[in-house]
Amino acid sequence: MAKQITIIGTGYVGLTTGACLAYLGHQVVCIDTNVEKIAELNSGICPIYEKGLPDLLAKGLETERLSFSDTADTKLLQNEFIFLCLPTPQAEDGRAELSAIYEVAESLKSFLSSKAIVVNKSTVPVGTCKVISQIIGREDIDIVSNPEFLREGSAIEDFLKPDRIIIGANAIEASDRVAELYSNLESPIIQVDWASAETVKYATNSFLAMKVSFVNALAAVCEAVGADIELVAKGLGTDNRIGSKFLQPGPGWGGSCFPKDMQALVRLASDSGYKFELLEAVVDANAQQFKRIAEKVEKAVGKSLEGVHVAVLGLTFKAGTDDIRNSPAIAVSKLLSELGAQLNFYDPLVESLPEELSDGIVHDSAEKAVTNTEVIVILTEWPEFKDLDWIKFQRIAKSSKIVDARNLLNPQTLRDIGFEYASLGRK
Ligand SMILES: NC(=O)c1ccc[n+]([C@@H]2O[C@H](COP(=O)([O-])OP(=O)(O)OC[C@H]3O[C@@H](n4cnc5c(N)ncnc54)[C@H](O)[C@@H]3O)[C@@H](O)[C@H]2O)c1
């Protein structure tokens, strides 16, 4: 049965959740304090790059199941379900910054209708649902934890076909009512308590980051011992207990979630009396990986990078998204810039550079970015980079060197064209 839902926070998670819940037949209003974003959405413009989202947005607006508001009108807070999809960035001490969640909980508590459920989708440390419940302080309102596992770049598919849906609640009736919202999906629903639901989300992201760091380290070992990481990853990933996903080496993990969630779990553990040394080592290993890529570039050039023109292909934290938050491409580029390199960027979806790279130049084509540079560095795995005119690039670049930090291109093809080609852990 169609339910009335209010989403507070219309970013990657809130907008995807809103558009998908409307697609599933519910009546959804999404609220955000960003007035321009809401104006864009109301006129059918999708503010983020996400495959399939513009279509769902258009459908939602057309069927009037989806609407947007820049004010938390009290009427909009009287819906049966209030989803919190608010930012939980990393605070200076590594903990999650929860002020947006707590302020919103405070501001809506007196307007909620009796029997409403507040569903938290933001990634939060254990204990947050309990605090939300204390702030709201009403026995007729339930709080439910429903962490989100979508990946940018495949957010719609991940939302509509998730591996599982986690619902954490204190009361089974509230848990069942939230489960009912997803009754059209075929995915397993795992009903747990607040603390377990909150922990699953951090555990998932930390585990995946650890897997990436593991394969990055393994690629370094392969280089040293003469093994090939692609063959090793294949042999490893076909083991059902391990699985083949997240076994591609790269410049390190990043994005808006992994780094902050990793730090938050480390802090959560130490606040609770456990020193999570394993995860601390993974955080260090990731910082080392950025350095390792910068060193590979230096080695490829064969001299100091001072004044050397470098082409950087890719700025987003992965392909399929326009998100550059905590992008490994930016972390590595920053190191190259500190070593004196003059950076020329191209990314299919990025037109301007973050402040820390403001010395660089962003070009509107890969061809312009590589012209007259001494080395080309691939930092994001955009599939279209495979189809670039590498024969022409070999001519227009000042010297024929590539560091492919995503193992995206075929080494033999590039060497046949005349490039000196380096990648990660491949023969
Ligand atoms: N991005 C992802 O891939 C992803 C995946 C799973 C979980 N998460 C988690 O979901 C949460 C949201 O992440 P996101 O990527 O959607 O963030 P985001 O920054 O894209 O979106 C957050 C939105 O909330 C709005 N906002 C801030 N304060 C507000 C307020 N008081 N009232 C109304 N709107 C307000 C902002 O304007 C912004 O549009 C975070 O906890 C994140 O860790 C993110």
Image (tube, grey):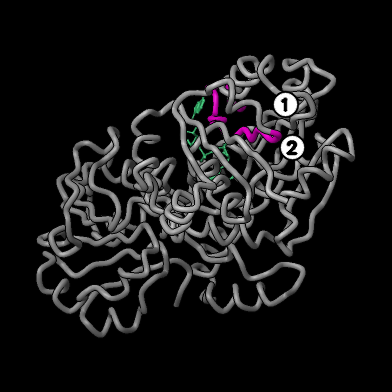
| Amino acid type, label 1 | Thr
The magenta segment: 80-96
Q: CA distance from mark 2 to mark 1?
A: 9 Å
Q: Nearer the viewer, residue 389 or 278?
A: 389
The answer, for residue 70, to whether it is visible in the render is yes
Q: Which residue is mark 1?
A: 128
- Label 2–label 1 contact, CB within 8 A: yes
Secondary element at image label 2: strand
Q: Residue 216: percent from the left, percent from the top?
A: 53, 59
Q: Residue 157: percent from the left, percent from the top?
A: 57, 62
Instruction: Name the residue: 28% across, 66% down.
Output: 402
Left or right, 124 with respect to 316, comes to right
Residue 391 image-quadrant placement: bottom left
Left or right, 141 with respect to 277, comes to right
Residue 143 among magenta residues: no
Numbered circle sitting on residue 255? none
Secondary element at image label 1: helix
Residue 389 vertical position relative to residue 59 in the rendered view, above or below: below
Instruction: Name the residue: 53% across, 75% down.
Output: 230
The answer, for residue 266, to whether it is visible in the render is no
Residue 311 image-quadrant placement: bottom left
Q: Nearer the viewer, residue 366 or 65?
A: 65
Residue 236 image-quadrant placement: bottom right
Residue 168 vertical position relative to residue 100 in the rendered view, above or below: below
Q: Residues within 10 Å of mark 2 (few under 14, many from 20)?
A: many
Helix, strand or loop for the magenta stretch, by majority: loop
Residue 83 among magenta residues: yes
Q: Residue 308: percent from the left, percent from the top?
A: 16, 51
Residue 306 vertical position relative to residue 92 in the rendered view, above or below: below
Q: Earlier in the sequence, mark 2 or mark 1?
A: 1
Numbered circle sitting on residue 145? 2
Q: Residues within 10 Å of mark 1 (few under 14, many from 20)?
A: some
